[in-house]
Amino acid sequence: MENKSNISLIGFWATGKTTIGKELARKLNMDFVDIDQIIENKSKMSIFEMFEKLGEEKFREMEIKEMDKIQTMKNTVIACGAGVVLNNINMKNLKQNSVVIWLDANSKEIAERIKKDKNFRILRPKELTLDRIDEFLGVRNSLYKKYCDFKIDTFGKSISQNINEILENLKIKF
């Protein structure tokens, strides 16, 4: 992987970063970390609670601190939060030693996945509309594209199909 020892997964909510990341790490015998989970564990609050009680700015500060530690990680699959691309510092740190893969899905699929996931950690599913998802994607998709080494469309595919596609792309790109 061209002097890069980590694989980082970026993308919007419910595109498979954690689910695919865990399985990819297992398959490649790598460690796995979920940045949002680390922040939740350290703060003893869910991401939703942090946004509500502390505000997005405080969450983003915590995210920057955790993303800074990525430079020291080796042989790790990293599931990044959906908004990690909003900060150039985060992405600079990430790109130093990671192959960055954008996991994508359309807004309708994202909404369906969120509604099915009882443990979804950002917004309450009833507050999530297709317009709201499209609004977020409108801002973030160009950043996901800018920072990724390659993109995987997860729509309508099994976890193993997505992992096989990632592995094929890793061989081709690196």
Image: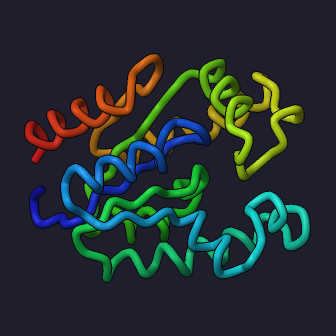
Q: Is residue 145 left or right of residue 11?
A: left
For the point 37% across and 32% down, the residue is 159
Seen in the picture, residue 119 relative to 167 is either above or below; the reply is below
Give 3 or 14, whichever is nearer the viewer: 14
Looking at the picture, how far across and down is residue 164, in whole percent?
A: 22, 32
Q: Residue 51 occupies which quadrant of the picture?
A: bottom right
**Residue 10 vertical position relative to residue 6 in the rendered view, above or below:** above
Q: Nearer the viewer, residue 101 or 34?
A: 34
Compare residues 46 and 149 and report the one nearer the observer.
46
- Give the position of the N terminus as an image quadrant: bottom left
Q: Is residue 155 left or right of residue 31?
A: right
Indicate the position of residue 170 as horizontal and vertical percent values: 16, 43
Quadrant housing residue 31: bottom left
Q: Is residue 34 above or below residue 9?
A: below
Query: Which residue is located at x 39 percent, y 71 percent?
Result: 93
Counting the numbered discs, the total is 0
